[in-house]
Amino acid sequence: MEIGMVGLGRMGANMARRLRRGGHRVVGFDPVEAARQAAAVDGLETVDALAGLAAALAPPRVLWLMVPAGAVDATLEALLPLLGQGDMVVDGGNSHYRDSQRRAAHCQDLGVHFLDCGTSGGVWGLEAGYSLMVGGDADAVARLRPLLETLAPAPDRGWGHVGPSGAGHFAKMVHNGIEYGMMQAYAEGFALMARKQELGLDLAQVARIWQHGSVVRSWLLDLAADALADNPGLEGIAPYVADSGEGRWTVAEAIDLDVPAPVITASLMERLRSRERNSFTDRLLAALRHRFGGHGIARAS
Amino acid sequence: MEIGMVGLGRMGANMARRLRRGGHRVVGFDPVEAARQAAAVDGLETVDALAGLAAALAPPRVLWLMVPAGAVDATLEALLPLLGQGDMVVDGGNSHYRDSQRRAAHCQDLGVHFLDCGTSGGVWGLEAGYSLMVGGDADAVARLRPLLETLAPAPDRGWGHVGPSGAGHFAKMVHNGIEYGMMQAYAEGFALMARKQELGLDLAQVARIWQHGSVVRSWLLDLAADALADNPGLEGIAPYVADSGEGRWTVAEAIDLDVPAPVITASLMERLRSRERNSFTDRLLAALRHRFGGHGIARAS
Amino acid sequence: MEIGMVGLGRMGANMARRLRRGGHRVVGFDPVEAARQAAAVDGLETVDALAGLAAALAPPRVLWLMVPAGAVDATLEALLPLLGQGDMVVDGGNSHYRDSQRRAAHCQDLGVHFLDCGTSGGVWGLEAGYSLMVGGDADAVARLRPLLETLAPAPDRGWGHVGPSGAGHFAKMVHNGIEYGMMQAYAEGFALMARKQELGLDLAQVARIWQHGSVVRSWLLDLAADALADNPGLEGIAPYVADSGEGRWTVAEAIDLDVPAPVITASLMERLRSRERNSFTDRLLAALRHRFGGHGIARAS
Amino acid sequence: MEIGMVGLGRMGANMARRLRRGGHRVVGFDPVEAARQAAAVDGLETVDALAGLAAALAPPRVLWLMVPAGAVDATLEALLPLLGQGDMVVDGGNSHYRDSQRRAAHCQDLGVHFLDCGTSGGVWGLEAGYSLMVGGDADAVARLRPLLETLAPAPDRGWGHVGPSGAGHFAKMVHNGIEYGMMQAYAEGFALMARKQELGLDLAQVARIWQHGSVVRSWLLDLAADALADNPGLEGIAPYVADSGEGRWTVAEAIDLDVPAPVITASLMERLRSRERNSFTDRLLAALRHRFGGHGIARAS
C-alpha cells in the first residue's frame, strides 16, 4: 500500500521504516528539516510540505499522524483542505480519546475517514512490531489492514479494531495507566531489595531469575533486568520521573466514571512527588510537628 | 497526692509542673543531670537515683514513667526491685500496647500495679492539660484519679479508663495514626493553595477563616494558622518529616486485624518518602522510561 | 441591609434566618413551593418568582445564590436581565472556581458585581455561624461586609476576602478536600479500635477523651463523639459514602498543578470504593489468583 | 539424584512429577492419605511417615519441604531427629525469611544443611518450570544443582543462588509484593474499560492485542486474556480477594527499612477492603456527613 507519514520523530521514523520493510510505499513529512534529512539518509522518500505529501499520494490517500498530542489540531487544520472525499487520516499518537471523537466527527463532515490508533511498543517497535488498538469505522479499518498487519508483531496478532471512534485511544490511555502501576510495583520491589544490604542481593540476577517461570515475568521486567545489569547502582540517574499525560487522563477518567483506581492513582502521585524539590507539604508537616511536640526541625541547608 | 516522676524531659518536666500546681507532691528523677537541674531550678524536688525516689515516697507509691519507649524495660528492671506490694507504676509514654500488656503481667506477678496511660497534648499540655487514656485495673485507676484529674484539662474531662492493660496505649497509638492522616490532609491542601499562585491566597488568612465555623476547624488547624502566620513561605524548614513510631504500629496493627487503613498508611509512606534523598524507586522508573520509550533521563547533578 | 436569597433549601433557609436575626431584611425565593412555604411559616418574606425578588429590593440590590452547582448558570440567565448597573450577585454555593471566574467576567460585562463565596458550616451554621471565603472585587466585598459579619460566627472572624474572582470557591474546594482526608483518617482509626474487640474499647468514650487536650481534637471529632454515643455500633447505616464533587475537583486540580495529594486522593478513592457492589477489579483479581495458583474462588452468592 | 518431597499438595505433587520426568528418584510423603494416594496413582513412590522417608533415601539425603508456612516448624521438629550429618533440608514454600534464617542456624547446629528456596510458577510450573531463588551456603546449593536445573524452565535459567540464608525467601516475598501491585494495576485498568460501556470494548480482545508488542505484555496479562475470554463478565465470581501473607510481610519490611512502597501497600489495602462486608469506616463517614451537612444516609437493607 501507499501511505503518508506525518511526523518523523522517534516513533514516526521507525514506523515508516517498518512499513517500507514490509513492502509499502511511504512518503514522509516533518516540519523539522533535520528530521526529514535523517529519514532521507535512511532511504525514506520525504517531502518538505504537507501539500507535497498530498500531491505525492494517489487518492484515496492514507495519512498517518505521529505528532505530539498538542500538535494534532493544527496539523489537521493544515492537512484537511488538501484532502478529498474518501481519504483517510489515522492518528497514531497519544491523543485524548475525546479529542479523537471530536476530530472524527469533524472529518466525517468533510467526507474524510478518521481513525484513532493507540500505538504501544516504544523504540522496540521497529524490530518487534507495535501493539495497535484502532477505533473508528469498520470499513476504514478494513482498508488500513495491510498496513496494520505490517506494523504489528505478526499479521494476525498485536492489532485489532476495538470499537468506534475514541476506543483506540481510550484503550491506549488505560494501557499507559496500567504501565504506571506495573512500573511502580517493580521499582518499589527492587528498591526494597536494594535497601536490604545485609543480604547482598544482586538485583540484576534476581530480575534474570524472575524472567523465567515466575509470576511477575514481563517485558518491563526484561527491561529492568537489562537496566540493572548495565548499571547496578543506577548511578548518574536523577530520581526524577516525567509523565506524558495518559496517566493523568486515566485517573481523571476513573474518577469521572466512579471507578476506584487507587494503584494507578498512587503511581501518578509518586511521579509528581519525584519532581518536588522543596515540598511545601513536607515543610508544613515538619512545622506542625515542631509546634505541637517541640520536635526538632531540620533546617534547610 | 504524692508521685514520683521518672523522666524529666519535655513531657515529664511539664507534667511534674502541672501536678505541683495542682497541689500534689512530686519528686522527680532523670538519669541526665542537666534535666534534673533544670527541673530543680523550677522548684521541683529531685533525686539523683531511682533508689532515692523510692525512698522519698511513702508506700504505697505511685511512679509515673515518662521515658522513651526504648528505655521502659531497663527502667522497670531497675525500678521494680525497689518497689513493694501495692506500689503502682504508670507508663505515660508512647510504648507499644503489647509491651504494656507484657509489663503489666510481669508487675502483677510481683504485686505491683501497672497502668498504661496514653498521653496526648505535647508541649501545650502544661497549660491546657493532657488528654489521658488509661488501661489496666479499675482499682488502680481509681487510686490514680486525683492525679489524672489534675493532669487533664478539667477534672471531669479529657481522661478516662478505657479498658484492660494495653487499652490505653492502643488508643494512643490509633490517636497518632489519625494525627498523621489529618496533618497530611491539611498539608496537601495548603500546598495546593500555595501552588495556585495566580490567586495570591494568603494561607494564614485562609487558615484563620477556617478556624471559625468551618467543618475543618481543629486544634491542628490552629497550629497551622500560627505556623503560616509566623513564616508564610515556611522558609528555612527542610522538607523532612520524622516519625516517632506509633504510625508504623498503627499500620502494622491494621494489617494484622485486616482493617483497611489506606489514608493512615499513605500518610506514613509520605513521611518515609520525605526522607529519601536519591530514591532508587524513582531512578529505576526513569531508567525504565528511557529503555522503552527513549525518553530522556535527567542526569544526577 | 437588604438581601434577596435565591434558594431556600437547608443551607439557604438557615442563612436567611441568621441574617434576619442579625437585623437584615431578607426576601426569599425558591422555585419549589414547599420550600417557600416552609420558609414563610418561619416568618421569612418570600416571593414566587425571580422577577418579584428583583422588584422587592431597592437598587443597588444584593442577591445571594444558594442553589446546587448545576443550577447556577440557569439561575443567572434568568436573573441577570432583571438586574441593573451596580447590583450584586453572590454565589454562596459549591461552584467550581473556574465557573465562578467565567461568571464574574460575564457579570462584569453587564455592570453587575459578582462574588464567589465559599461557605462552610453545614446545618450548624445557623447557630454557630458560617465560615466564609470571598473572592472578587474589594469594593464589592466591602459593600457586602455587614451581611458577612452577621453570617460569620463573629463580626471579626470566620470570614475574609481571600482574593480575586474564583479565590473563594478555590479555597472552599480545598477545604472540602481536606475534610475528606480528615474524615477518612478518623474513620479508619475508629474502625481499627472497633475491630480490636478483645480490648472492649468504648469508641464514644475515647472520642470524648480526645475532645479535651489531645492533638486530634476538632469539630469533626465532636461530631464523631456524638454519632458514636448515639449509635455505638453504627447500626442501620449503609456503608455507602456519597460525595458532592469538590473532592473530585481538588484531585483534578492537584494533578493539574503537579501537586502530589496522595491522602486526599485516597480518601476520594475510598468513597468511590464504598459504592461498588460487585467490583470488577476484585473479581478479576480473584480470577487471576485462581488461574496462576489454583487458589479457590469464592462463588458469588 | 534422589530426593524426598515432604508435602504432596498442588505445588509439591507437581514438583515431584517434574523431577521424576527429569530422571530423578523422588520419594514422597504427605500426612494426608488422600494426597499420598493421588500422587501414587500418578506413579510416585510414597511413604506414610517421615521416618519411612528418611529410611528410603541414602545419606546424605535431600529433603524438600513443600508445606504451608505454618507447618514448617512442626515438620522440621519431626524430621530433624531422623536426619544425620550432611543431610540437607530445602524449604521451597512461602516461609518468612527471618524464620528461614532462624531455621538455618538451628539446622547448622545439628550438622544439617538448610536452604531457603523461593518458588514461583504456581500450577503452571509443572510444564513451564519454576522460578527458583535459593538462599544459603554455596556448597549446599552446588549439591542441589541437578534438581534445580530440572525444576527450572531450563538448566541455565530461572534459578539462582541469590545470597545467604533468608535471601531466597526475601526475594520471593518481594516477588509477591510486586505481583500484588501488577495484578491490581491490570484489574483497575480492565475495570475502567468495563465501565466505559458506550465504547463497547471487548476486554479479552484488548488483552490479546496487548500480548503482542505492547509495553504491558506479561505472563499475568496472558492469564487475564484467558480469564476474560472464558468469562467476559466474570460472572459467578465473588469480589473477594484472599492473600497468602507475603504481601503483608513486604509492607512490614518496607516500613521497617524506611522504604516507601505506596503501590504495593495500596494493593494490599485493596485486598483487605475486598473482604469488608459492612465497613465500619464507611458507616462512620456516612454518619459524619449526615451530622454536619444533613446529607441523607442510605439505610442498611
Image: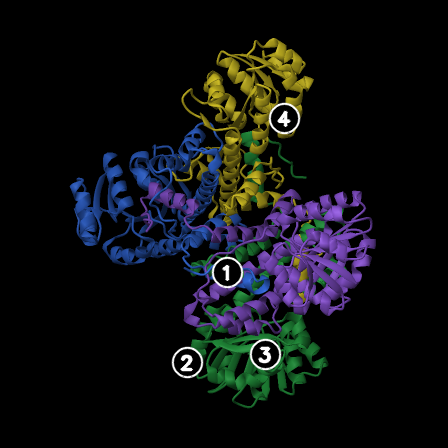
Chain colours: A purple, B blue, C yellow, D green
Q: Is residue C280 visible?
A: no
Residue B70 image position (x, y, % from top left): 33, 56
What residue type is disc 4 on? Val
Tags 4 and 2 on a common chain: no
What mark, if any, has residue D109 been given in the picture?
A: 2
The residue carrying pointer 4 sits among few (fewer than 14), some (14 to 19) or many (20 or more) residues within 10 Å by Cα, namely many
Question: Which quadrant of the rendered structure holds the C terminus of chain B?
Answer: bottom left
Residue at point 68%, 20% (across, down): C32
Q: What is the distance, in whole Å, between disc 3 and disc 1 at their CAs?
A: 31 Å
What residue type is disc 1 on? Ile
Helix or strand or loop: what does disc 2 sit on?
A: helix
Q: Which numbered mark, 4 or 1, is in the foreground of this view?
A: 1
Q: How many marks?
A: 4
Is D180 drawn above or below residue D298 in the view shown?
A: below
What residue type is disc 2 on? Asp
The residue carrying pointer 1 sits among few (fewer than 14), some (14 to 19) or many (20 or more) residues within 10 Å by Cα, namely many
User: Residue D118, located in which quarter of the rendered image?
Assistant: bottom right
Q: What is the distance, in whole Å, between disc 3 and disc 2 at their CAs?
A: 33 Å
Residue at point 70%, 58% (across, down): A5
The residue carrying pointer 2 sits among few (fewer than 14), some (14 to 19) or many (20 or more) residues within 10 Å by Cα, namely few
Residue D28 image position (x, y, % from top left): 62, 81
Q: What is the distance, in whole Å, between disc 3 and disc 4 at their CAs?
A: 66 Å
What mark, if any, has residue D157 been given in the picture?
A: 3
Residue B23 image position (x, y, % from top left): 23, 34
Towards the viewer: D134 or A28: A28
